[in-house]
Amino acid sequence: DSGVTQTPKHLITATGQRVTLRCSPRSGDLSVYWYQQSLDQGLQFLIQYYNGEERAKGNILERFSAQQFPDLHSELNLSSLELGDSALYFCASSGTSGGAATGELFFGEGSRLTVL
Amino acid sequence: AQSVTQLGSHVSVSEGALVLLRCNYSSSVPPYLFWYVQYPNQGLQLLLKYTSAATLVKGINGFEAEFKKSETSFHLTKPSAHMSDAAEYFCAVSVRGSARQLTFGSGTQLTVLP
């Protein structure tokens, strides 16, 4: 158990809809990262938050947005969903020492999104 | 920008045989390197990491990897494969001074044959 919790584990929705994925980082971790894993694109970094502030952006579509709340949990919002958005979305967190200095991440079990 | 190339999207070995999963990196500054494992329907779990200390790194489950700067490689090995090692393995790199996000390779699916 990594200590990172993601909900929901599975989500099925239709094209054009909007969903929200939730992540609770390990206790004490200030950084939260979102990754998308799909068969054709592999593991792609989407966005990072540190203590409520956006720190880095990767290959995140404009239809997607994220935020980190004062209690450090994070939400990834996906809107105007397309078939190609079907993927496994991972949240990861890193600590304030050691792991954070080297980039070691602790991953949740992911939220599998299916867009029909 | 840093990148990682994993050679071989699928590797099959017999139980008890040597496991060798290849990873080459590209980075303009000294990297940190990682191997993660993903079992079916699970998240990624850290196997081992290189952070500029010893070049031979030992991880969990009997895996180890050697950082070779001259070859820009960080191959993962295990002397004797076990059925439970069947999973997908990802090599990843981060660099000092960055926002610490990991850049992952495309993954290698390891199959262990009885």
Image (tube, rainbow, N blue to C red):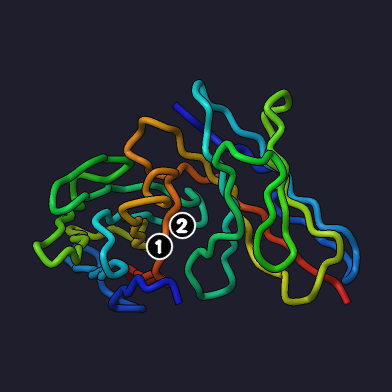
Which residue is under mark 2?
A: A38
Q: Amino acid at mark 1?
A: Ala
Residue at disc 2, secondary structure: strand
- For disc 2, the neighbor class at 10 Å (few under 14, some 14 to 19, many from 20) is some
Quarter assignment of residue B19:
bottom right
Q: Identify the disc placed on residue A87.
A: 1
Left or right relative to B99: residue B41: right
Labels 2 and 1 within one chain? yes
Residue at disc 1, secondary structure: strand
Host chain of mark 2: A
First-in-chain label (2 vs 1): 2
| Camera-side residue of A87 and A48 | A48
Q: Residue A61, how many percent across, how many down?
A: 25, 45
Host chain of mark 1: A
Check the image and report above or below for B109 versus B4: below
Q: Residue A12, how many percent across, how many down?
A: 31, 76
| Camera-side residue of B83 and A84 | B83
Residue located 26% across and 40% down the image: A57
Residue located 88% across and 77% down the image: B114
Q: Are marks 2 and 1 in contact (CB under 8 Å)?
A: yes
Residue located 73% across and 27% down the image: B71
